[in-house]
Image: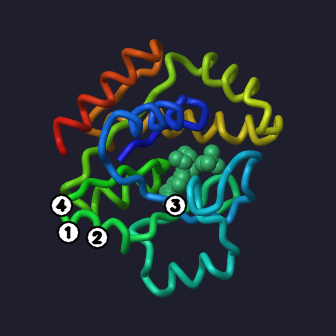
């Protein structure tokens, strides 16, 4: 399970990791709209609020959380199927969801990706071009809270200051447990 503030570079690190390691990727459900280039079924399952509520009611989610006015959740069935057949699954989720996974899956390895500093994080969010100013401010506030509670929730913290080093660290933490 990999978590970390929006803008910490965790999605790019995970993309690099998936190119190196044979692991399934958990495609989350979300009520937010796709960003340019995002593919339904690959990056997320983009669903309506009504469908999301139905998934909650039918207990189809391992965890879910509200993040920045949208709902995000991890469908449980693919994870159970994969782990029962001996495969590992990578989850990329935010802090509230991470806490739920920590309680429900004692086999989870919990990794937090931290930016080198809050200034670097802000710079990355602002230069991304797909996030408006209000969104950047909200995401920075959430990031502060996530950074503060990371040490008590996660088993490992990877600081994304040098790209190659961070990819190597993440890869070895995960391959150790496959
Ligand atoms: P974004 O909108 O930038 O794709 O994602 C916002 C945040 O939601 C990120 O921190 C991302 O890791 C998190 N997220 C993505 N999928 C899930 C999920 O299934 N559950 C939870 N709790 N968070 C998720």
Q: Quadrant of residue 87?
A: bottom left
Label of residue 28 in the image: 3
**Pointer 4 local density, CA inside 10 Å: few below 14, some 14–19, many at least 20:** few
Q: CA distance from mark 1 to mark 3?
A: 19 Å
Percent x, y of residue 9: 54, 29
Instruction: Choose the circle earlier in sequence order: 3 or 4.
Output: 3
Label of residue 84 in the image: 1
- Mark 4 or mark 2, which is nearer to you? 4
Marks 1,4: beta carbons within 8 A: yes
Residue at point 76% right, 42% down?
135
Label of residue 86 in the image: 4
Residue at disc 2, CB closer than 8 Å to ligand 1: no
Q: How is the image coloured?
A: rainbow
Q: CA distance from mark 1 to mark 2?
A: 6 Å
Percent x, y of residue 67: 61, 54
Marks 1,2: beta carbons within 8 A: yes
């Amino acid at each position: 399970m990999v978590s970390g503030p929006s803008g910490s570079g965790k999605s790019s690190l995970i993309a690099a990791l998936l190119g190196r390691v044979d692991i399934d990727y958990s495609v989350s459900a979300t009520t937010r709209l796709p960003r340019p280039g995002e593919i339904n079924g690959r990056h997320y399952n983009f669903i309506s609020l009504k469908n999301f509520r139905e998934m909650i009611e039918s207990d189809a989610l391992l965890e879910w959380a509200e993040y920045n006015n949208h709902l995000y959740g991890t469908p449980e069935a693919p994870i159970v199927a994969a782990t029962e057949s001996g495969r590992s699954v990578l989850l990329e989720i935010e802090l509230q969801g991470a806490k739920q996974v920590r309680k429900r899956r004692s086999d989870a390895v919990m990794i937090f990706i931290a930016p080198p500093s809050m200034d670097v994080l802000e710079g990355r969010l602002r230069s991304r071009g797909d996030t408006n100013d209000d969104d950047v401010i909200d995401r920075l506030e959430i990031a502060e809270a996530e950074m503060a509670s990371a040490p008590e929730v996660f088993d490992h913290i990877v600081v994304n200051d040098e790209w190659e080093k961070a990819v190597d660290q993440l890869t070895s933490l995960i391959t150790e447990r496959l």
